[in-house]
Amino acid sequence: MDILNLSKFNILSICENEFEFLIQVVANSLPLTCPHCGCTANLYKHDSREQICMDLPIHGKRAGLLIKRMRYRCKDCNRTFWEHLNHTIDEKRNCTKRLLSYIEKQSLKRTFVSISEEVGLHEKTIRSIFRDYINRLEETHRFETPNWLGIDEIHMIKPRCVLTNIVERTLLDVLPNRNKESVVGYLSRLPNKGQIQYVTMNMWQPYKDAVRAVLPKALIIVDKFHVVRMANQALETIRKQLREGLSPKERRGLMHDRFILLKRHNELTEMDKITFDLWTNKYPSLSIAYNLKESFFDLWDSDSRQKAYLKYHDWKAEIPNELQMAFEPLTWAVDNWEEEIFAYFDHRVTNAYTESLNSLIRLVNRLGRGYSFEALRAKILFTKIKMPPRETEEPTLLGVDISTLIEILEKGVS
């Protein structure tokens, strides 16, 4: 029985123990020509050596090939050469090509350590195979430069910059950090970067500086999600400060207060409204803070930049002195990013993928143990991509669909 199913080899012997197979093989065909002089008839066996290379696991055990490799001498030029096995063996990795292909695919799904233990190659070799595979993928696939670029971040071991196609709601890349130099480097390498007209981002100064440096004509718009949530954070600060001065019994009277206060007014149930009225009658500052949060949210329904601008300054004037400190991060942000924040009212597009991105963050955090950043990035960007034949033209992709990616990765880790 041919346990290997490798047509270029004949099996000489098979040894098996608890953990692995060691299969002695020899090539079943002679070289046709001398690689030095091209002679086709005057070749003879000079000597041989044994070489071990790893193959696909068999029946759950590692499989090593003990290859009896022949050395030939040419009678015409009197030079020697070893028989070529590149039809089956990857000489660089000292493993079969089919094992190499298996490792490449598995490296997007599993940790390097687990693959190393399964196939019998060193973890550094698995990491090197993975790196070469990703380099080939990146050379072969080019994501299309969008008209509307989104810049956000994801926590993968530490905060990383995420770049997206806003209109298509797809992921373009994840950078190793979120500093200006990294973002400038990425934007500078984009093909046809001049076609980027709009950039939506959060209020992180290095992103703004990078866009201004590389895309001076692009209009920057701060994603309103990152602005309005600061109103919730201000309300949360006031709620926590209030609870600090209460007795345990009084705190119990504010049971589930956070969940009710974070709701919009039109989302409150009748029971929520009754509970809310009891709290606010007893703690007026809570009522003022909630109403300030709600009116700030309402500001985003304005039908023009000018109306929104006027409403904002009216809203800011209504903040009482005792609550100024809690709302200061929000007012400071709006005052310092005024042009980019109010640009939303001229171009009402946001990072609409945020909800999906949050799901991706949670999933990546689950996957994160045992993975390097490079492996996590590759897992995110290339999970769906299949390598085309080398001769084909480089395809242009819109990016990785986040919702589909989450579904695929969930199946992979379930």
Image (cartoon, grey):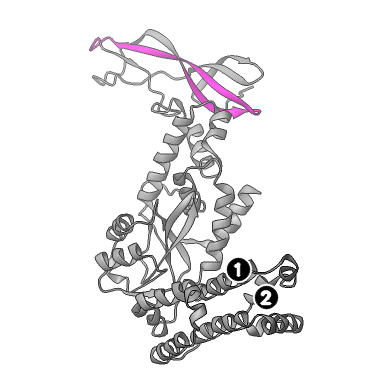
Q: Residue at x 41, y 85 (%)?
A: 345
- Whether 9 is drawn above or below 292: the answer is above
Structural crowding at the residue carrying mark 2, measured as other residues with C-alpha within 10 Å and reported as few (<14), some (14–19) or many (≥20)? some
- What amino acid type is highlighted by mark number 1? Lys
Marks 1 & 2, CB-CB < 8 Å contact = no
Q: Nearer the viewer, mark 1 or mark 2?
A: 1
The x, y position of residue 366, in whole percent, is 59, 50
Residue 240 numbered mark, or none: 1
| The one of 116 and 157 positioned closer to us in this rendering | 157
Structural crowding at the residue carrying mark 1, measured as other residues with C-alpha within 10 Å and reported as few (<14), some (14–19) or many (≥20)? few
Q: Which residue bears the numbered disc 2?
A: 260
- Quadrant of the image occupied by residue 201: bottom left
The x, y position of residue 93, in whole percent, is 42, 28
The answer to whether any part of residue 396 appears in the image is yes
| The one of 130 and 59 positioned closer to us in this rendering | 130
Specify the segment rendered in magenta.
52-78
Q: Residue at x 34, y 56 (%)?
A: 179
- Quadrant of the image occupied by residue 203: bottom left
Q: Earlier in the sequence, mark 1 or mark 2?
A: 1
